[in-house]
Amino acid sequence: MSLPKEENLACDLSVFSSGVRRAHLTLYSKVILQEAIEVEELPDGYKIFYPFSLQLHLELSLWTKNEARCCPFLSFALDSSADPGIISLSVFGSTFAKAFIDPWIGEIQKNINKKEV
C-alpha cells in the first residue's frame, strides 16, 4: 500500500451547497475548535475529547459526516460509550493526512489551554 501524494490532500468544499458549507464551517469554529477539553495524539491521528451532551453529540455527528464528504482522505470515529460524561472524536489517516490536520489540532489545543488558565 502506498501513501497518498501530499498534493491530493485538500478539502473540497464544493461538495456542499453554500448554506451547508456555512453551517459546516460554523460547527467547525464553534464546536470542533471551542468545545474540546482534551487532545490525545494517536500514531495515525488524534483523539479529541468533548463533554457529553446530546446536542454536542448530534453536532459532532453532523460535522464528521460532512467532513468525510469534503475530506475523503480522513477517517473519523465518534464514541460516547467509554466514559458516560465524554464524547471522543478520533480523526486519522495517512502520515500526510495527520500532518494536514496538525494546524487545527494546534488551534484546539490553544483553546483548551486558554480554558485552563
Image: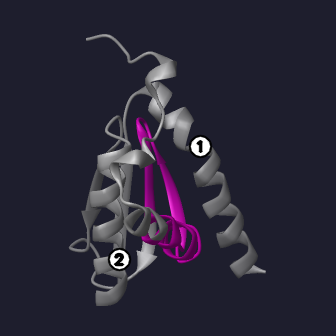
Nearer to the camera, 12 or 54: 12
Q: What residue sits 30% from the left and 49% below the top? A: 68
Which residue occupies the extreme left position in the image? 81
Tell me the crowding category of disc 2: few under 14, some 14 to 19, or many 20 or more residues within 10 angstroms, Cα based. Answer: some
5 relative position to 61: left or right:
right
Amino acid residing under circle 2 = Glu
Please report whichever mark, 2 or 1, sits nearer to the chain's N-terminal start.
2
Q: Amino acid at mark 1?
A: Asp
On whether residue 22 falls in the magenta region, the answer is no
Query: Relative to 86, is 14 above or below?
Result: above
Determine whether 48 is above or below 13 in the image: below
Q: Position of residue 12 (x, y in %)?
A: 42, 41
Find disc 1 in the rendering and name its residue: 102
Q: CA distance from mark 2 to mark 1?
A: 22 Å
**Which residue sits at x=55%, y=76%?**
30
Q: Which residue is mark 2?
A: 59
Question: Could you tell whether 6 is left or right of 81 in the image?
Answer: right
Rendered residue at 50%/66% (across/down): 28
Secondary structure beneath disc 2? helix
Specify whether 29 is left or right of 96: right
Q: Which residues are magenta?
A: 23-48
Task: Name the element at disc 1.
Answer: helix
Residue lying farthest to the top in this orientation: 2
* Neighbours of disc 1 within 10 Å: few (<14), some (14-19), many (20+): some
Vertical position of residue 20 compared to residue 90: above or below: below
Residue 23's spot in the image, x, y percent?
44, 72
Looking at the image, which residue is at 29% across and 48% down?
69
